[in-house]
Image (cartoon, rainbow, N blue to C red):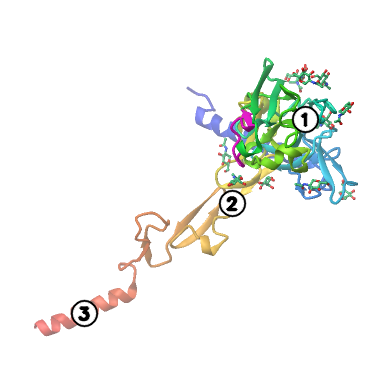
Amino acid sequence: MGSKWNPLEMMRILLVVGQLILISSSLSSSQTVSPNCNKTCGDVAVPYPFGIGEGCYMNKYFSIRCDVTAAPTPKPYLWDSNIEVLNISLEGELRIYTHISMACYNESGIRQQPHNFTNGTLSAFPFSRTKNTFTAIGCDTMGMIAGSNDQGFSSGCLSSCGRIDDVTDGECNGIGCCKTSIPEKTLNYTASVGSFNNHSNVWSFNPCSYAFIVEDKSFNFSREDLNGMRNRTVVPSVLDWAVWNETCDAAKKDTVSFGCKAHSECFDFVNVPGYRCNCSSGYEGNPYHGCVDINECADPKKNPCDGICHNTEGSYSCSCPKGYHGDDKKGGDGLGCIANPKSSPLMIILVGKFIRIFSFFWC
Ligand SMILES: *[C@@H]1O[C@H](CO)[C@@H](O)[C@H](O)[C@H]1NC(C)=O
Ligand SMILES: *[C@@H]1O[C@H](CO)[C@@H](O)[C@H](O)[C@H]1NC(C)=O
Ligand SMILES: *[C@@H]1O[C@H](CO)[C@@H](O)[C@H](O)[C@H]1NC(C)=O
Ligand SMILES: *[C@@H]1O[C@H](CO)[C@@H](O)[C@H](O)[C@H]1NC(C)=O
Ligand SMILES: *[C@@H]1O[C@H](CO)[C@@H](O)[C@H](O)[C@H]1NC(C)=O
Ligand SMILES: *[C@@H]1O[C@H](CO)[C@@H](O)[C@H](O)[C@H]1NC(C)=O
Ligand SMILES: *[C@@H]1O[C@H](CO)[C@@H](O)[C@H](O)[C@H]1NC(C)=O
Ligand SMILES: *[C@@H]1O[C@H](CO)[C@@H](O)[C@H](O)[C@H]1NC(C)=O
Ligand SMILES: *[C@@H]1O[C@H](CO)[C@@H](O)[C@H](O)[C@H]1NC(C)=O
Ligand SMILES: *[C@@H]1O[C@H](CO)[C@@H](O)[C@H](O)[C@H]1NC(C)=O
Ligand SMILES: CC(=O)N[C@H]1CO[C@H](CO)[C@@H](O)[C@@H]1O
């Protein structure tokens, strides 16, 4: 057609341009994140996009405040709130402490300090629906949770018991302890408790009702909880985090601010609008910084080859030593590298000698 640009050529050029953008965007990101940023606060690792202090986090939703005066070790908090952070995983989980709501009565059935509260405009990261439950504890107890997801929800559970002996450790079945799931997209909530008889019939062993959101696997109900929650005022719960407010397709348009850096892939977050990044296969590290090649050959004990391992960008290849042939990757045909008779000069000499000796006797 006389055109200088055939489609294949165009494609190749576009790919090169794409790679350049990728490289420049990962450079610009590493320039904006100061190398002086503290990567831990006390015992808690704070991986990027989270960061402590101006210039260390991706955007304001990932800002961590480190209280260096806390004893015995410094403690991290989300944003400028008083939500304490327990740990952060790059897979998209953030563990925080949530407060226990409670209401206590004295012997004559008078409510002591109403302790209900609204905890947190968690404006960005919802509570994990699968990892947390709403739990209430008490023998004269109605636990209630109200909150906002897309619409607004309210839910709850009832727990009652007459005698401490009816209560079984480890069982949250409505006798001393009850639980219910929380809806998706729960960003903030109020947990509160009520009672039917002011704990008057159970006061001797259970003067208070409690309610809270908790990471299900980290809470094991005990009879002791009925009288003081084993002195706890907070319990761990799990938030789902993502780069807030944009889908992958929308975020990719701005290559500089796009959170998924070199050799990573973008995944839309289903719970609330947002995305997460993952290293591409063959790469490892922090996808929000840029992933690096895995050297599959580095550890001779884990050599993936029968023969010689060669690390390549994003993968690896195997070869058999000189004079051998066969399936060099482990888990292939199972035979591995086999000596190659044709290319072995020693073999040829031996075979030659044998034929000569044989023919000598034959004659
Ligand atoms: C890092 O933390 C230490 C104390 O743990 C503090 O003295 C130092 O100023 C912090 N550095 C930065 C860059 O925030
Ligand atoms: C985070 O904390 C939980 C519970 O304390 C623990 O099981 C988990 O191993 C911790 N994860 C990391 C990465 O520290
Ligand atoms: C219970 O509390 C009320 C009000 O605080 C008080 O008047 C009453 O004496 C208390 N009863 C007991 C048994 O302590
Ligand atoms: C706590 O609950 C009581 C009654 O249930 C209510 O009057 C009060 O306003 C609540 N306080 C807060 C801070 O929500
Ligand atoms: C949750 O937050 C929304 C706005 O972000 C607010 O309108 C609502 O009152 C809050 N709900 C609770 C239970 O705190
Ligand atoms: C919970 O506690 C009970 C009794 O203390 C124990 O038998 C059970 O194994 C515990 N369950 C878990 C999941 O830790
Ligand atoms: C205790 O509960 C009963 C039944 O709900 C109620 O009639 C009574 O007034 C309550 N007592 C106090 C001291 O609140
Ligand atoms: C709770 O605290 C009290 C007083 O500080 C103490 O006597 C008790 O042993 C503690 N209980 C538990 C389970 O730690
Ligand atoms: C979410 O994104 C929209 C449009 O991209 C923007 O107008 C809005 O301010 C963002 N909201 C937050 C809380 O960042
Ligand atoms: C991201 O990578 C991790 C570890 O390689 C893997 O477990 C996870 O399933 C991946 N997530 C997605 C959405 O592919
Ligand atoms: C994280 C948070 O906001 N916690 C608060 C929950 O509510 C109680 C009672 O109002 C406060 O004491 C907590 O600080």
Contact, mark 2 vs mark 3 (Cβ under 8 Å): no
Contact, mark 1 vs mark 3 (Cβ under 8 Å): no
- Please name the residue shown 19% across and 78% down the image: 355
- Mark 3 neighbour density, 10 Å: few (under 14) some (14–19) many (20 or more): few
Q: Residue furthest left?
A: 363
Quadrant of the image containing the C terminus: bottom left
State the residue position of label 3.
354
The numbered mark at residue 320 is: none
- Mark 1 neighbour density, 10 Å: few (under 14) some (14–19) many (20 or more): many
User: What secondary structure is found at the residue carrying circle 3?
Assistant: helix
Camera sees residue 90: no
Q: Is residue 178 inside the magenta stretch?
A: yes
User: Disc 1 marks which amino acid?
Assistant: Met
Q: Residue furthest right?
A: 69
Does the Cβ of the disc 1 residue fall within 8 Å of ligand 11? no
- Please name the residue shown 70% across and 26% down the image: 141
Q: Residue furthest top?
A: 151
In-image side of 263 versus 79 (left or right): left
Q: CA distance from mark 2 to mark 3?
A: 50 Å
State the residue position of label 2.
294
Dividing the picture into quarters, in which one does residue 236 lie? top right
The answer to which of marks 1 and 3 sits earlier in the sequence is 1
Q: CA distance from mark 1 to mark 3?
A: 95 Å
Does the Cβ of the disc 2 residue fall within 8 Å of ligand 10? no
State the residue position of label 1.
102
Part of the protein shown in magenta = 168-180
- Please name the residue shown 65% across and 42% down the image: 218
